[in-house]
């Protein structure tokens, strides 16, 4: 899974491609990225697409649409004819951009070949490696920013997060701020300006 704007990636390995594993990958990927985007661009995988027509016309699988509706993500099909989605022709009409990402991920994380005792150990290493790569990799379009920094900025401004809400409040000169009946102290530099504190479910009950 990759975010188009920040280029941040989430990689996880499964023994095979079933709908249950596809749904699990989406849930874990959204949790890893810290939120959900409004649109998802998908390849023509059988676990998501039932029928393929010309252009971007697709009939998505019913269970896949239920998952997309749950996360409020608009599923969009890849179009090999679109220049920004396809970089080179691929066999059987597969999308070049998606295929290039698979090859890039294989070269980035799986070469040289590593050994792990279990899938859990491998996936734990992959998740940590995705974070390490994002922090040291320069963004291709914003050279003064890393992928990780662009990722955090996008999550803060554009991603939708469950179990979290924000409401503006002002910190007093005594370094106190109140949010949903919770009174907190802030550092001196934040006194007086408007704040947007995150309100999580576990915090609202404490």
Image (spheres, rainbow, N blue to C red):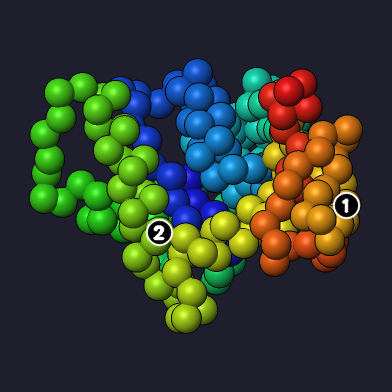
The residue at 49%/51% (across/down) is: 2
Compare residues 20 and 12 and report the one nearer the observer: 12
The C terminus appears in which quarter of the rendering?
top right
**Residue 187 appears in the picture as rendered:** yes
User: Residue 92 at x, y = what percent?
Assistant: 41, 48
Q: CA distance from mark 1 to mark 2?
A: 32 Å
The residue at 72%/58% (across/down) is: 157
Quarter occupied by residue 75: top right
Q: Nearer the viewer, mark 1 or mark 2?
A: 1
Compare residues 170 and 70 and report the one nearer the observer: 170
User: Residue 166 at x, y = what percent?
Assistant: 82, 45
- Asked if residue 94 lies left or right of residue 54, the reply is left
Judged from this view, the residue extending furthest toward the front is 174
**Residue 165 appears in the picture as rendered:** no
Which residue in the structure is indicated by mark 2?
134
Q: How many marks?
A: 2
Which residue in the structure is indicated by mark 1?
169
């Amino acid at each position: 899974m990759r975010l188009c704007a920040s280029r941040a990636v989430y990689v996880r390995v499964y023994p095979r491609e079933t709908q249950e594993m596809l749904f699990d990958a989406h849930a874990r990927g959204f949790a890893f990225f810290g939120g959900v985007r409004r649109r998802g661009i998908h390849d023509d995988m059988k676990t998501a697409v039932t029928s393929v027509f010309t252009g971007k016309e697709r009939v998505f699988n019913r269970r896949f649409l239920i998952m997309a509706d749950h996360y409020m993500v608009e599923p969009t099909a890849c179009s090999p004819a679109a220049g920004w989605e396809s970089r080179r022709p691929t066999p059987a009409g597969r999308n070049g951009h998606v295929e290039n990402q698979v090859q890039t991920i294989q070269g980035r994380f799986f070469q040289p070949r590593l050994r792990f005792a279990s899938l859990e150990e491998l996936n734990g290493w992959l998740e940590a490696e995705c974070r390490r790569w994002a922090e040291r990799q320069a963004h291709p379009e914003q050279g003064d920013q890393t992928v990780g920094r662009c990722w955090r900025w996008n999550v803060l401004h554009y991603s939708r997060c469950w179990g979290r809400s924000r409401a503006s409040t002002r910190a007093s000169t005594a370094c106190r701020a109140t949010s949903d009946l919770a009174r907190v102290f802030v550092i001196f530099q934040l006194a007086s300006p408007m704040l947007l504190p995150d309100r999580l479910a576990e915090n609202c009950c404490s």
